[in-house]
Image (cartoon, rainbow, N blue to C red):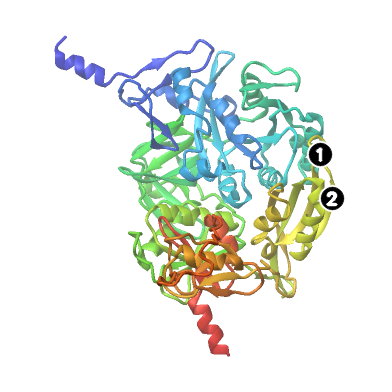
Amino acid sequence: MSPFSLVAAFASFTLTITVANGFSPIKQHGSAFVTNNQFTSRVFPTLSMSATVEKEATLSSYSSSEDCNIRNIAVIAHVDHGKTTLVDALIKQSSVFRDAQQAGEAGTCIMDNQDQERERGITILAKNLAVARMVDGKKYKINIMDTPGHADFGGEVERVLNMADGVLLVVDSVEGPKPQTRFVLDKALRKGLKALVVVNKIDRPAARPEFVVDKVFDLMVELNACDEQCDFKVVYASGLLGKAGTTPNNLEKDMGPLFDAVMEAIDPPKFASVQSDSLQCMVSNIDYDAFKGKMGVSRISEGTVRKNQAVALVHPTKPKKTGRISNLFVFDNLGKLEVDEAKAGEIIMFAGFDDVEIGYTLVTNEAGGVNAAPPLPPIAVEQPTVRMTIGVNKSPLAGREGKLLTSRMIRDRLFRETDRNVALRVAETDSADRYEVSGRGQLHLTVLIETMRREGFELEVGPPTVIYKEGEDGKIEEPWESVEVRVPEEYMGSVVDTMNQRKGELQDMGREEGEGMSVVKYLVPTRGMLGLKNSLLSATRGTALIDSVFDSYKPKIPGDIQARDRGSLLAFADGEATTFGLEGAQDRGRLIAKPGDECYKGMIVGIHQRPGDLEVNICKMKQLTNMRSANKGIVVGLSSSVEMGLDDCVEYIGADEILEVTPTKLRMAKNPDAQKKGSGKK
């Protein structure tokens, strides 16, 4: 064999590893660890191999729904119930990694690959992966969709459920169902999906699995689940230990019982035809590739799609878009695998449309689309409840750090975000350099602001406000949230007092067994939720655990709800903060500014100890004279300043204040426009 033919043979080589425990063969394509269809910085030492695809990998050798060897499941849970850790265990026990060393290098929170997800410790974006399983000599593919657990990112859950045939409902073995558990389970039950209940963290000393299962059943009944949905299967697991079992006291050595329960409890995809003309494929997500452009992620409801096929994107209320499938992928482990065709039941990613949008249905356009199927109903998403203004930074210190400063750049970035963030709304305002951004909650919007900040934007952010709407009787209604607070019993009085100040309505109060915490449940106007977190943490010395979820719209409560009971310390003049000036101002309240910080007139440099604002001169210098000072020997000392992150600043600012966001700095100040309006009224 010539050297050239030897090199060519090695270039087309595809490594296939057969695992003895019955898992399917796996293929390592290249040397990078692929997560969320993008290459990350974690690189493993593997051979450099081609992405040559074998036909067997498509798993599409079926012609009816009964023979379909695919399971599509969405993992849903309340925040901090161990969902991501459980998915990590499923990945590591599915032969996704070459060996234990590679699995160890992957670390924890494998699917949470975004910087903010790892920093905040929560899942923000829904992601897809696929693992294989051999059962009774037959190869099955399990498409897993990891979803966020926080209520503010419920839009991610709603669109992902369109691709699922069942859900893994992960519930903590001590806490049981929580507000977000109710929200995501309600969405799944309304779509007719069956739930496989996973009682996670079963290794906790205070675990009470029987109580948790009973509470889940009560929740199912309360949400009007059908008899088949109420007859759910239960698996007990510890995602941290990587073990599962059918009884709480007898766990197996791996997650095998959970895999088996998925095959037994989750139905295969249901479809009527795999003919090309029957193609119906709802776009539920958008991804971007530097070479292929925008790509749609969707689940094939009916029919078959092929590479280079003439197709169209149709919507009940929007114009038709025609084109061809230039690239077709299915999910394979943590990456994607290019295939020639895919049939009903499979979750695909396709390229060929520069303007693909979520909510469109992919149908055939062969013969001009004469025999094409009708579009599917668009994705229904809950409406936003909180809005903020985002615009051009116009402070005296603007333009010193960021690279993206103009209103056109900000506008393009905001509207581009709405392509994949279906719960976000962006609208023009009366001002040409300011835009109104609406979302599910304060966290939903601050994640977007932090992302733009890291991209190099400088922004001016207004305070969060709630979105009112007119009810059927013509009265103005406002959003309310269901809030659950767990706190030690000695702080219960402080929690009740704070909730009453926020116009909350008490729903339930009691003592939680197991960890000795008291639990109080309230219905609170969303107006009262703005800034509530810091108030509760201060009142309970950081011991309160707060969970909330949108409840409903109710008639607006008359009057204002006091967000904070203290004013701000404002900079008296432009300049640089000095130690001497800060020492004189610290007696007036808690300082935010540090020595050497640049400030300008009207900038918030601290928190006043009383209601109302107070101007302080933190830039003044100590006068140097030949006279000996009477208090020369007195050393005051400077107290440590208050560290405030983006979320803290957004919670703090009031109706007449703004937040200046740059890549490295956060500055709060009085809104000059609001002050002009106020002086005009006088």
- Of labels 2 and 1, the one closer to you: 1
Is the residue marked by circle 2 packed among few (<14), some (14-19), or many (20+) residues within 10 Å? some
Query: Residue drawn 58% across and 35% down?
Result: 84
Q: Position of residue 643 (x, y in %)?
A: 54, 54
Q: Which residue is mark 2?
A: 509
Q: Callout 1: helix, strand or loop?
A: loop
Query: Residue drawn 43% across and 50% down?
Result: 313
Is 183 situated left or right of 219 in this image?
left
Q: Callout 2: helix, strand or loop?
A: strand
**Label 2, label 1: how many angstroms apart (C-alpha)?**
14 Å
Q: Position of residue 64 (x, y in %)?
A: 55, 29
Q: Nearer the viewer, residue 255 or 294?
A: 255
Q: Which residue is mark 1?
A: 516
Name the quadrant containing residue 554.
bottom right
Q: Nearer the viewer, residue 321 or 386?
A: 386
Q: Nearer the viewer, residue 196 or 224?
A: 196
Name the quadrant containing residue 44.
top left
Q: Residue furthest bottom?
A: 682
